[in-house]
Amino acid sequence: MNEQEKIFDAARELFNTEGWQNFVSDIQNNIASIRVESIDDEKGFWIAKGQLNVLHSISGYENMMKAAEEQEEEDDDASAI
């Protein structure tokens, strides 16, 4: 098992935990709670934008890792031919 496979295995283990599911649920709730219409000024807008970028990155981590693993498998299959 190479280093990349170990990373994917550890990520899969993480994603299957109740704690991860709770964390992602909290992140999605935080995303939903940020309302553009309640922002008072430009500074608040940029702060909210930054928060949303970070929250979306975290909430998409599982899908990103799954896509990376699939790409790795496709690359391995292609190089085996």
Image (cartoon, rainbow, N blue to C red):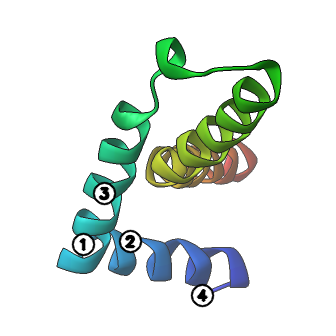
Residue 81, quarter of picture: top right
Which callout, 3 or 1, points to the residue nearer the camera? 3
Residue 29 in the figure: left or right of residue 2:
left
Q: Position of residue 55 (x, y in %)?
A: 55, 47
Q: CA distance from mark 3 to mark 4?
A: 34 Å
Q: Quadrant of the N terminus?
A: bottom right
Label 4: state its secondary structure.
loop
Q: Identity of the amino acid at label 3?
A: Asp
Residue found at x 34% / y 80%: 13
Dot 1 crowding, Cα within 10 Å, few <14, some 14–19, many 20+: few
Which callout, 3 or 4, points to the residue nearer the camera? 3
Residue at image mark 3: 26
Whether residue 70 can be seen here: no
Q: Earlier in the sequence, mark 1 or mark 4?
A: 4
Q: Is residue 21 above or below residue 75?
A: below
Dot 4 crowding, Cα within 10 Å, few <14, some 14–19, many 20+: few
Q: Earlier in the sequence, mark 3 or mark 1?
A: 1
Q: Identity of the amino acid at label 1?
A: Asn
Do the residues bearing badges 1 and 4 touch, measured as CB atoms within 8 Å? Answer: no
Do the residues bearing badges 1 and 2 touch, measured as CB atoms within 8 Å? Answer: yes
Label 3: state its secondary structure.
helix
Residue 38 in the figure: left or right of residue 68:
left
Q: Earlier in the sequence, mark 2 or mark 4?
A: 4
Residue at image mark 1: 16
Label 1: state its secondary structure.
loop
Q: Position of residue 80 (x, y in %)?
A: 68, 52
Residue found at x 58% / y 84%: 6
